[in-house]
Image: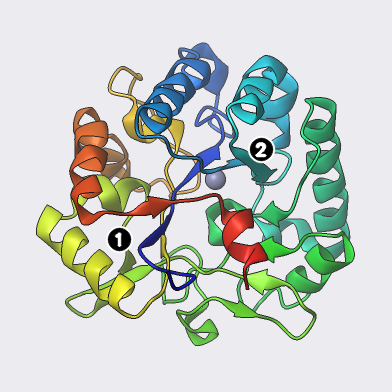
Amino acid sequence: MAKTDNIFLFSVDLEDARENVLNGWQYKERVPAITHQFLTWLEKNNFNCTFFTVGKIAEQYPELIKEIVLKGHEIACHSYEHTPVDKLGKENFKKDLDKNISALLKAGVNDIKGFRAPVFSITEKTPWAHDVLKEMGFSYSSSVLPAKNPLYGWENFGQQHKKLENGLIEIPMTLGNFGPLKIPIAGGVYFRVLPKFFIYNSIKNCLKKNEPVLSYFHPYDADAEQERYMHAGINDSRFYNRLMYYNRKNFFPRLDSLLQLDLKIIPYKLFAERL
Ligand SMILES: [Zn+2]
């Protein structure tokens, strides 16, 4: 089997949507319950994947982290408190990563290889970020959205995964062409909103090129019971906030239907090790 055959790099960005929301902690705690739903789905299908985990979550739920590790999944970094890389700057990015790593180690994770920037915030405006990751011992990153995007995007990076000059591997988010737009096909909101046939066809196109298909999901993507509030990081857009809640109840059924594409879900670090 070729090394990227039908590979689906399924990931959960383990963060609490209440973080960075004004008075967010007044809303219901949902992360442990929904994370268990993800774990059940993965176990049922005999898959292991990657949980990109915010440091604060590891501090708050060390038992949950231990359970994820025990079930054979990978835990990787996703910043300490979900601050985009450009908002931190180089020195604070290092400090933030240190705190993220310490929190994961303390929760019992002992093999940290990867990083995903909050909101894919590594772009050409933060050219130092990949070097910082390499210096700090990471072997891969999945932090680039290689298109124009209203939040963050690095169009000229290119859509293929690659080993950078410093040896770090960057595995950018998978995109599909939706009219004139290039958008993530299996990411949070997009995965719930886009027509199924578009998602299927885009995945098939990607697999044909022998590229892995990347996803990013969050606990809230599968949470039909969470209260309505304005999510952080979407520029207070009411339209986008409505999409944040759209079709959550069909999240797992949609995932189930993807399995007919005979996808092979593996943790990111396994994929990166083979390169
Ligand atoms: Zn995130």
> Residue at left 83%, top 33%?
105
Percent coordinates x, y for residue 153 in the rendering: 49, 72
Q: x, y (%) of residue 266?
A: 49, 50
- Label 2 C-beta lies within 8 Å of the nearest ligand 1 atom: yes
Residue that carries the numbered disc 2 in the rendered image: 54
Image-quadrant location for residue 223: top left
Classify 32 as above or below 265: above
As helix, strand or loop, the secondary structure at mark 2 comes to loop
Q: Quick check: 180 above or below 117?
A: below
Locate residue 121, reporting x and y percent: 59, 62
Residue 136: x percent and y percent? 87, 59
* Amino acid type, label 2: Val
Q: Earlier in the sequence, mark 2 or mark 1?
A: 2
Disc number at residue 185?
Answer: 1
Tell me which residue sits at (35%, 35%) in the image: 221
Which quadrant, please, contains the N terminus?
bottom left
SS for callout 1:
loop
Q: Is residue 116 above or below residue 236?
A: below
In space, the residues marked 2 and 1 are separated at their CA atoms by 23 Å
Q: Quadrant location of ligand 1?
A: top right
Labels 2 and 1 touching (C-beta < 8 A) = no
Locate residue 82 relative to residue 158 in the image: left or right: right
Q: Is residue 204 left or right of residue 105?
A: left
Judge whether residue 47 can be spotted in this image: yes
Q: Residues within 10 Å of mark 1 (few under 14, many from 20)?
A: many
Is residue 264 or residue 255 the one in the foreground? 264
- Label 2 crowding class (10 Å Cα cut-off): few <14, some 14-19, many 20+? many
Amino acid type at circle 1 is: Ile
Return the residue nearer the eye: 208 or 131.
Answer: 208
Instruction: State the count of labels.
Output: 2
